[in-house]
Image (cartoon, helix red, strand yellow):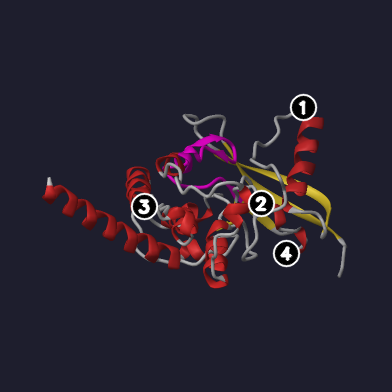
Amino acid sequence: MSNHLKNITLRIWRQAGPAAKGNFETHVVDEITDEASFLEMLDLLNDKLITEGKEAVVFDHDCREGICGTCSLMIDGQAHGPQRGTASCQLHMRQFKSNDTITIEPWRASAFPIIKDLMVDRSAFDRIIESGGYITAETGGAPDANLIPISKIVADAAMDSAACIGCGACVAACPNGAANLFTGAKIAHLSRLPQGQAERYSRVEAMVETMDEKFGSCTNHGECEAACPKEISIDVIALMNKDYRKAKFANRKDLARK
């Protein structure tokens, strides 16, 4: 595989704070290798800016292994860039040609206000998770919990849902700014397991209604699935909607008895 050097022009969104007016700045990164990751390229840009006495570009990053979900970048209008099933930190410069101009923006969603430059506040996701509460299944010690029989099909499906890293790409890609794929994945990975059954319906009701307070409505565009770096299926949205209807029906019956 070639490892030649290339020059890249960057159009980067700069914004001093949540209430400030933002704008694009143009910068050039010279002689970047194919093997450099996209975030390493931004590191080189920031080194250059600091050397010149300018302020570095603010962007989220942590593990740089596609696990933590913090590398939330809109790259040329695509969440996490042109390579499917890849977080921004896993994207490499071999995906671009020399003398390309790349536009880099933060997530564009009202539920994710911009903090500075490319960094956004995704705490609305935390509110959804918090509303889900906890599980009360009494499994004893760790060995006892591991002895609960779960079929491979169910375990695999639960793990596929649990792969969600909460990056927010689904919201950024959705024309409505909906968080149904994220919420559906977080609900599904528990509702598919025996340990998650005790609060299954109260959990889905609380999480969906918290989601609805902060995000737009899903109209089945499917952009969320296409943008997800873990390629989580929109099947989790169908499962969430099914459980939510069951939860509301059960509540209605309980109210009728009182």
**Badge nearest the viewer, 2 or 4:** 2
Percent position of residue 86, x then y? 65, 60
Circle 3: residue type:
Val
- The span picked out in magenta is 104-126
Assess whether mark 1 and mark 4 are in contact (beta carbons under 8 angstroms): no
Q: Which residue is mark 2?
A: 67
- Give the mark, 3 or 4, whose residue is nearer the N terminus: 4
Q: Which residue is mark 1?
A: 53
Front in this rendered view, residue 236 or 23 = 236
Tell me if residue 66 comes above or below residue 4 in the rendering.
above
Determine whether the residue tagged by mark 4 lies in a helix, strand or loop. helix
Label 3 crowding class (10 Å Cα cut-off): few <14, some 14-19, many 20+? many
Q: Residue at x 52, y 47 (%)?
A: 107
Residue 14 among magenta residues: no
Q: In the drawing, what numbered circle is on residue 204?
A: 3
Q: Residues within 10 Å of mark 2 (few under 14, many from 20)?
A: some
At 56% across and 45% down in the image, what residue appears? 106
Give the spatial CA distance, label 2 vs label 4.
21 Å
Which residue is the site of mark 4? Answer: 95
Q: Nearer the viewer, mark 2 or mark 3?
A: 3
For the residue marked with disc 2, what is the amino acid? Ile
